[in-house]
Image (cartoon, coloured by chain):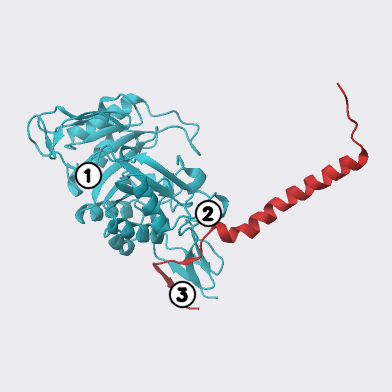
Chain colours: A red, B cyan
Amino acid sequence: MLKKQITRKEFLKTGFLGILTILALPLSRIFSIKDNVSRKDAKYYKELAG
Amino acid sequence: MSKVKCLLCPRECVLGSGDRGDCRARMNIDGKLQTLVYGKPCAMHVDPIEKKPLYHYLPSTSSFSIATAGCNLHCMYCQNWEISQREPENTRNMDLSPSEVVRQAMAAKCKTIAYTYSEPIIFFEYAADTGRLAHKNGLLNVWVTAGYINPEPLKEAVTFVDAANIDLKGITDKFYKTMAKASLDPVLNTIKTMKREGVWVELTNLVVPTYNDTREDFAKLCDWVMDNVGPEVPVHFARFWPMYQLKNLPPTPEEVLTQARETAMSRGIQYAYVGNVPGHEGNNTYCPVCKKIVIKRRGYMILEYNIIVGKCKFCNHKIAGRWE
């Protein structure tokens, strides 16, 4: 079986992409929140003074 | 920005700008209360109506069932906690307008739309609009609810809810506070109001070991039912399974459920059932007069059906319910 040696450059590139992916996940949820929930006027409430 | 007070349920949450209600599904946005779940169900399925459970309402028909995230109760044994105790931002939601719900329900040949799994009260606006559209298209509406709602919205709900399975989780305020962080009286009011306004009502009591499983509990619950809504309201005693925050308890022993059913019948309840125990004689419907089996069931399936034009085939006694 051939063993491919990972170069330092490939290792760093993969690690960097992995970190970006982990960071991007919560950010993507923030941007998609607007589509995932509604914003519609509710019934049965009152505004409070003050 | 002004604060608002939600008036949908007895919690009556007071919310500052950006605050969310206890149900997680309503928020004060710029001084106005908004629903975060309109048209955004996180669960959708076609179920047999017996699953709700409704045993006396259009048996053997399919019910198009939807739910959104959130709930205004926090029951320690909730089997749907992954949607009921979550913010809608944290569930996978579909885009399903009221007209799309009705269209899909009709395409699936369902006779009813069920608002279920979590709690229809907290997606009230969505349930109301969908419910009215359902009526215009010849469909009926079923709520599976804990009944924790204020009188004003309840008055509106009974104009579009045709049948309801209401949880009567316990018969003491202490139980409701311990188990669900709620109170008993609003639930009793909901049961009485729905019955009085012509909604077909069936009740479910989940029997939880060490919490509400004594003969006295069953007797007190059944006496309330007899005195307030009458002997023809079906009562389902359902088996608890270890779940959510009560994984330390065992499932309800079958003999306790049998005792609950026998207590109910001795107190005058005409239709007492045992739920979540396939094969139990309490799965069946018996004529209250001649005692013969009028509907034989195994789980949600009907094996025998002996009701003709709403009456017992054997003795002609009228069996309470809506059969066609």
Q: Are marks 2 and 3 on the same chain?
A: no
Gap in Å between the C-alphas at discs 3 and 1?
39 Å
* Residue B188, horizontal then vertical, whole percent: 28, 51
Q: Amino acid at mark 3?
A: Leu
Residue at image x 47%, y 66%? A40
Residue located beneath label 2 in the image: B88
Gap in Å between the C-alphas at discs 2 and 1?
35 Å
User: Of the residues under marks 2 and 1, which one precedes in the sequence?
Assistant: 2
Q: Chain of mark 2?
A: B
B228 in relation to B249, above or below: below
Q: Are marks 2 and 3 in contact (CB under 8 Å)?
A: no
Instruction: Name the side, left or right, on which A48 lies relative to B1.
Output: left
- Count the marks: how many? 3
Gap in Å between the C-alphas at discs 2 and 3?
26 Å
A26 in relation to B269, above or below: below
Q: For the N terminus of chain B, which image quadrant?
A: bottom right
* Residue B111, horizontal then vertical, whole percent: 29, 46
Residue located beneath label 3 in the image: A48
Q: Nearer the viewer, mark 2 or mark 3?
A: 2
Which numbered dot is residue B225?
Answer: 1
- Mark 1 crowd level (few <14, some 14–19, many ≥20, 10 Å Cα): many
Confirm whether residue B305 shows in the render: yes
* Residue B234, horizontal then vertical, whole percent: 23, 40
Q: Chain of mark 1?
A: B
Q: Are marks 2 and 1 on the same chain?
A: yes
Q: Amino acid at mark 1?
A: Val
